[in-house]
Amino acid sequence: MNKKIASRSSQLLNRCPWCGSDPLYVRYHDKEWGVPVHNDKKLFEFLVLEGFQAGLSWRTILYKRENFCNAFDNFDADKIARYNKRKIQSLLNDAGIIRNRLKIEATVTNARAYLNILDRYNSFDEYLWQFTDGRVIKNKWKSLKQLPATTKESDLMSKTLLKDGFKFVGSTICYAHMQATGMVNDHLISCYRYGEV
């Protein structure tokens, strides 16, 4: 199949309407959103990005994602946990990311909390997936209006993360994290990805 035909058939697919026609957003919807993630580092990356998204659109974060990756040492928690005032100031001067002191400092705090979880549980994956009993919660939404902002699972995740020293992990952020990392399948049932993930 040549690229033009592949592109045309991709456009004909029925998707969740939130991704619109923005190529980057569509690619994220088609390849990542809702796919179960069990890699500790990737789960940490999503938690960092979700924290930066607070009050902003996910599209904004997606367009800066590569810059975030470079600025935060490829989301290497060992390195981030050692960031000092000079490094934090350099991040505040980096126009490629969201320059919010509270969110940047929270990322350093969260890297330290993440490393503590690895010491205690040996796996960030097991720690986070405990809130869905290690399985994907498969919802059956027909419209975007039905999607919740929070659930009892995200409430519990938020409460536990806060207790364990994390910041910028309110229930709404936790639910967005659960959606992104496939702990819940919130693709609409009319979306071609619903059955795939």
Image: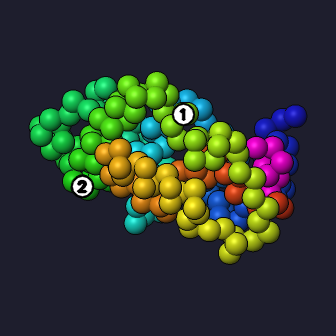
Q: Residue 56 carries which label?
A: none
Can residue 18 be spotted in the picture? yes
Give the percent coordinates (x, y) of residue 56: 42, 64
Quarter of the image where the C terminus is located: top right
Residue 195 higher or lower than 176, as above or below: above
Look at the image and give the residue range highlighted in magenta: 191-197
Pick whichever, 140 or 98, lies toward us. Answer: 140
Residue pictured at 12% horizontal, 40% vertical: 85
Q: Residue furthest bottom?
A: 145
At label 1, counting other C-alpha atoms closer than 10 Å, the crowd grade (few under 14, some 14-19, many 20 or more) is: some
Residue 66 locus on image (x, y percent): 44, 39
Horizontal and vertical percent for residue 141? 76, 65
Instruction: State how far apart marks 2 and 1 are (Cα).
Output: 26 Å
Image location of residue 133, percent across then percent down: 65, 43
Give the label on residue 102, or none. Answer: 2
**Badge 2 element:** helix
Q: Quadrant of residue 91?
A: top left
| Amino acid type shown at disc 1 | Asp
Query: Nearer the N terminus, badge 2 or badge 1?
Result: 2
* Residue at the disc numbered 1: 125
Assess whether residue 192 is covered by the magenta stretch.
yes
**Image point 31% across, 26% down: which residue?**
78
Please name the amino acid that badge 2 sits on.
Leu
Q: Is residue 53 placed above or below 131 in the rendered structure?
A: below
How many marks the image carries: the answer is 2
Q: Residue at x 55, y 65 (%)?
A: 150
Q: In this view, does 170 lie to the left or right of 94?
A: right
Q: Is residue 64 visible?
A: no
